[in-house]
Image (spheres, rainbow, N blue to C red):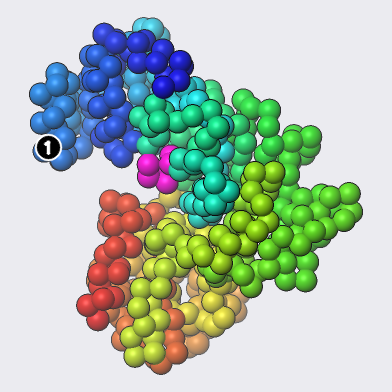
């Protein structure tokens, strides 16, 4: 156990600690705080929670406040651990801070007490796959690696297992990074495009949140040379930036030459990985490998990189082949919760596809998706809260022809899958790639993807 982690446990002993949100990251946090002797108050707007978890916390002395009054009495707390999706400027949090409370998160505490080197990955698209690849590369090198964060595994409670020579590879969302006072040692920003504007007040605020991943560190930052926002960030930190590009030659950094990912330095290039050796399809995944290779430079051999690329089959809900029925292939790309991510997935196929899209509205424009459907989509099937918004963007796109690209509006998710199967012909590809979050119909993108797979398997 690190001295810093031990000091944290001693500090929270007997302190009044509020934990807001009963999500994946906070349940282990509550358990840890209770074990450390903290006086814990668990709060959540939702009232429906796992009965076993509630019973356990209650029997150990935790206060449970669920429902509309879940933020009441926060000014009496010493420490408040907020859920990542909650803004810091919520009036109840601001009042508590004025009264002397410390407002933080499980992730911010982890970065403060983690005993090993941290590698952070953020971006609008590609975070989870890149995080997983980085973890696989470090593990292949023979090092102990902990992979977690926004990818679904909380890491704070694992600190006692970690040693100084280990690595923690962490996916970080803009919500986790917003107002955070700690950064990872090494970091990647895969790209920055409009996203989560239902929570962030502006694109500028969203970008500032992403930049927090490196704001309080001094080590290297891997950035996408093909993305305007990350290219601008590189100009702010030229001495630390390592660039990658799938579209142009770089004198320094990682790019593509003759079908290989190459490392460029002082005008010379070295072949690292043949694109044909990458098992998971799509140029966006080539970019994910470039970012992962750049951030692990000096840690992983080229032989290990090739080995992982040939073996790694991808992450669930990311262009996952569900099954082939009667010559029609069905893909689950439920992770695609933004237009740019959907477009990247569409480009990975060598033919026009039948696309199922639509979902929760994050106040993101769909103009780019509307234009892309002309090139990549054979039939568009829309469902969910954004169905009409996406339809309007497609109809408004230059060159749209309703005879060559029909749009089918569905009332339910089940209907959308059934219709896709009915219109598909031998040789077609059907892909669920929603371009939106799932919250209008599902708890998260994983539940949405599982439902899609369940429906496909029943066809």
The image position of residue 207, as x and y in percent, is 59, 39
Depicted 89 relative to depicted 9: above or below: below
Q: Nearer the viewer, residue 200 or 295?
A: 295
Q: Nearer the viewer, residue 137 or 422?
A: 137
The image position of residue 330, as x and y in percent, is 38, 77
Q: Residue at x 36, y 59 (%)?
A: 359
Depicted 94 relative to depicted 232: above or below: above
Viewer can see residue 113: yes
Viewer can see residue 198: no
Magenta stretch in the rendered image: 148-153
Q: Residue at x 40, y 73 (%)?
A: 321
Tell me the crowding category of disc 1: few under 14, some 14 to 19, or many 20 or more residues within 10 angstroms, Cα based: few
As drawn, is 76 to the left or to the right of 191? left
As drawn, is 94 to the left or to the right of 228? left
Which image quadrant for residue 153? top left
The image position of residue 301, as x and y in percent, is 66, 52
The residue at which mark 1 appears reads as: 52
Q: Residue at x 58, y 78 (%)?
A: 375
Which image quadrant for residue 295? top right
The image position of residue 266, as x and y in percent, is 89, 49
Residue 372 is a magenta residue? no
Count of picture labels = 1
Q: Nearer the viewer, residue 82 or 267?
A: 267
Q: Would you say the magenta stretch is mainly helix, strand or loop?
A: loop
Depicted 92 relative to depicted 250: above or below: above
Q: Nearer the viewer, residue 129 or 436?
A: 129
Residue 149 is a magenta residue? yes
The single residue placed furthest to the front in the displayed view is: 142
Rendered-image quadrant of the C terminus: bottom left
Q: Residue at x 77, y 50 (%)?
A: 253
Rendered-image quadrant of the N terminus: top left
Where disc 1 sits, the SS reads helix
């Amino acid at each position: 156990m690190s001295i810093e982690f031990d000091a944290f446990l001693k500090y929270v002993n007997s302190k009044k600690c509020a934990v807001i949100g009963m999500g994946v990251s906070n349940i282990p946090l509550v358990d840890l705080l209770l074990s450390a002797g903290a006086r814990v108050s668990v709060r959540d707007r939702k009232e429906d929670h796992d009965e076993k978890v509630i019973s356990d916390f209650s029997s150990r002395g935790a206060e449970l406040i669920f429902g509309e009054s879940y933020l009441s009495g926060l000014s009496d707390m010493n420490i408040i651990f907020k859920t990542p999706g909650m803004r810091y400027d919520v009036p109840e949090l601001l009042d508590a801070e004025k009264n002397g409370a410390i407002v933080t998160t499980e992730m911010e505490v982890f970065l403060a007490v983690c005993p090993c080197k941290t590698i952070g990955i953020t971006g609008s698209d590609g975070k989870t796959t890149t995080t997983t690849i980085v973890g696989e590369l470090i593990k292949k090198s023979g090092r102990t690696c902990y992979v977690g964060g926004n990818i679904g595994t909380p890491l704070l409670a694992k600190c006692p297992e970690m040693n100084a020579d280990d690595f923690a590879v962490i996916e970080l969302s803009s919500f986790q990074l917003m107002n955070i006072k700690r950064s990872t040692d090494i970091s990647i920003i895969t790209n920055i495009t409009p996203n989560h504007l239902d929570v962030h007040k502006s694109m500028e605020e969203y970008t500032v949140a992403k930049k927090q991943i490196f704001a309080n560190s001094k080590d290297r930052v891997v950035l996408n040379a093909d993305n305007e926002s990350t290219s601008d960030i590189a100009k702010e930190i030229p001495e630390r930036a390592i660039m990658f590009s799938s579209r142009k030659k770089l004198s320094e950094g990682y790019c593509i030459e003759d079908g290989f990912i190459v490392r460029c330095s002082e005008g010379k290039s070295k072949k690292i990985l043949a694109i044909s050796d990458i098992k998971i399809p799509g140029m966006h995944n080539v970019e994910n490998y470039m970012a992962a290779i750049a951030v692990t430079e000096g840690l992983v051999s080229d032989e290990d990189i090739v080995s992982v690329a040939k073996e790694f089959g991808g992450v669930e809900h990311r262009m996952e082949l569900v099954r082939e029925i009667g010559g029609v292939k069905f893909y689950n790309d439920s992770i695609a919760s933004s237009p740019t991510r959907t477009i990247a997935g569409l480009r990975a196929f060598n033919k026009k596809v039948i696309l199922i899209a639509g979902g929760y509205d994050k106040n993101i424009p769909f103009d780019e998706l509307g234009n892309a459907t002309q090139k990549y989509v054979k039939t568009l099937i829309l469902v969910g809260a954004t169905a009409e918004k996406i339809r309007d963007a497609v109809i408004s796109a230059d060159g749209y022809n309703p005879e060559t690209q029909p749009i089918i509006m569905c009332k339910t998710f089940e209907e959308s899958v059934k219709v896709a199967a009915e219109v598909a012909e031998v040789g077609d590809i059907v892909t669920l790639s929603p371009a939106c979050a799932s919250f209008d119909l599902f708890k998260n993108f994983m539940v949405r993807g599982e439902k899609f797979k369940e429906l496909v398997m029943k066809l």
